[in-house]
Image (cartoon, rainbow, N blue to C red):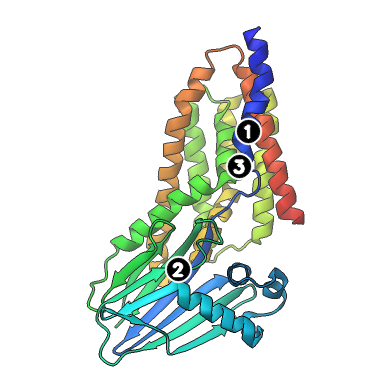
């Protein structure tokens, strides 16, 4: 009797648990900022998605899609400049600073560059900046990668919902560690907030019973996505993101369907499935690096650090889930748990496929 009740309750429980992630699989929105300091002058260029910018200043979304930002009307541009000055707060040499010039440009379709120029009476020493732009519109799931160029040296920061403030001085020494830590953090957050990647990995792990199977699957997935992540980040291979995101959704559906017959299949070879689909997921990971607008000189360090962050996040998830999955296999009803959860995961994959293909 208890087993029958469990069978009936499992779909309901899993539906409630998975409902918050049905709407979207990649909730992190990226912007990049380039700051150049030279003697008494500082220029700031904020590169952002025009749809996000339009949403932030309260204009209709179609304008952001159909009209380049540089051609927006003067009243709309004024809204943009007012919003940016309110949310991008600068102190130079201990005093609040306002830009002497502002301009809105269209570097490529779908993006806008907000350029600001600051001029000071004496050489720029210490600079502090609070960034409050776009976090509210993205419900906190927004990141801004900042590059500071001063005298040929560069410093970098990653701004997130929990870290919106940074400071620097032209005399600061360049270090590789801020870049490493920034991209490791980005990699961890990308896998933890990339619900489609998590759904795929979880679906693969649902049928595992041995630690060796876990190692094979995770290693295979890691090797595969590292290959395509590197190829895409270096510009050797380019695949339209729409295709990649749709195919990632189908990979989830495939594994979820296959799980319905896991007890009659040779699951020891699932590492092969993990490898082939991992190649596709690697292109998905590369999308986050593309949005980060990485300078060529930092590409290798950024790539390795980001991939390390993905693996750290992945290992934490496996470390938490595997003991639970191993415990479930002790009971007869674990077959129904695997099937029920797989149905819901497959349902999520179908929703994402429809959204990405026809949305």
Q: Earlier in the sequence, mark 2 or mark 1?
A: 1
Q: Depth check: 294 or 165 in front?
A: 165
Are there few (<14), some (14-19), or many (20+) residues within 10 Å of tag 2?
some
Quadrant location, the N terminus = top right
Residue at disc 1, secondary structure: helix
For the residues labelled 3 and 2, the Cα–Cα distance comes to 32 Å
Residue of label 1: 16
Are there few (<14), some (14-19), or many (20+) residues within 10 Å of tag 1?
few
What residue is drawn where x is 72% and y is 76%?
A: 66
Decide: is 356 above or below 200: below
Q: Depth check: 267 or 251 in front?
A: 251
The label nearer to you, 3 versus 2, is 3
Answer with left or right where residue 147 lies relative to residue 84. Answer: left
Residue 278 x/y as whole percent = 57, 45
What residue is drawn where x is 59% and y is 39%?
A: 199
Q: Identify the image quadrant of residue 38.
A: bottom left
Residue of label 2: 294
Number of the label disc, if any, that sits on residue 20: 3
Residue at disc 2, secondary structure: loop
Residue 332 x/y as whole percent = 60, 11
Q: Depth check: 172 or 220 in front?
A: 172
Q: Does residue 262 appear in the picture of this structure? A: no
Residue 100 x/y as whole percent = 43, 90
């Amino acid at each position: 009797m208890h087993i029958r009740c469990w069978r009936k309750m499992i779909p309901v429980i899993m539906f409630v648990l998975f409902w918050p992630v049905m709407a979207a699989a990649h909730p992190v929105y990226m912007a990049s900022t380039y700051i150049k300091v030279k003697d008494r002058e500082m220029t700031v260029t904020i590169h952002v998605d025009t749809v996000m910018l339009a949403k932030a200043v309260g204009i209709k979304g179609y304008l952001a899609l159909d009209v380049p930002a540089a051609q927006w009307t003067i009243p709309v541009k004024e809204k943009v400049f007012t919003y940016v000055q309110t949310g991008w707060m600068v102190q130079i040499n201990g005093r609040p600073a306002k830009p002497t010039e502002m301009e809105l440009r269209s570097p490529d379709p779908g993006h806008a560059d907000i350029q600001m120029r600051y001029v000071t009476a004496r050489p720029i020493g210490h600079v502090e900046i609070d960034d409050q732009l776009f976090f509210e519109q993205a419900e906190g799931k927004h990141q801004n990668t900042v590059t500071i160029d001063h005298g040929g040296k560069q410093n970098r920061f990653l701004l997130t919902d929990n870290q919106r403030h940074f400071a620097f001085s032209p005399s600061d020494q360049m270090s590789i560690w801020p870049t490493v830590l920034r991209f490791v953090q980005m990699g961890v957050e990308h896998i933890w907030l990339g619900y489609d990647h998590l759904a795929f990995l979880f679906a693969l792990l649902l049928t595992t019973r041995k630690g060796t199977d876990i190692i094979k699957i995770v290693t295979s997935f890691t090797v595969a996505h590292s290959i395509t992540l590197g190829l895409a980040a270096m510009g050797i291979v380019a695949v339209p993101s729409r295709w990649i995101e749709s195919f990632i959704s189908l990979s989830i559906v495939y594994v979820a369907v296959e799980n319905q017959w896991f007890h009659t299949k040779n699951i020891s070879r699932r590492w092969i499935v993990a490898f082939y689909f991992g190649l596709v997921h690697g292109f998905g990971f590369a999308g986050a690096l593309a949005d980060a607008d990485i300078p060529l000189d930092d590409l290798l360090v950024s790539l390795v650090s980001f991939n390390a962050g993905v693996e750290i996040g992945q290992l934490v998830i496996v470390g938490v889930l595997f003991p639970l999955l191993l415990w479930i296999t002790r009971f007869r009803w674990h077959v129904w748990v695997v099937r029920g959860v797989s149905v819901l995961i497959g349902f999520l994959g179908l929703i994402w496929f429809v959204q990405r293909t026809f949305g």
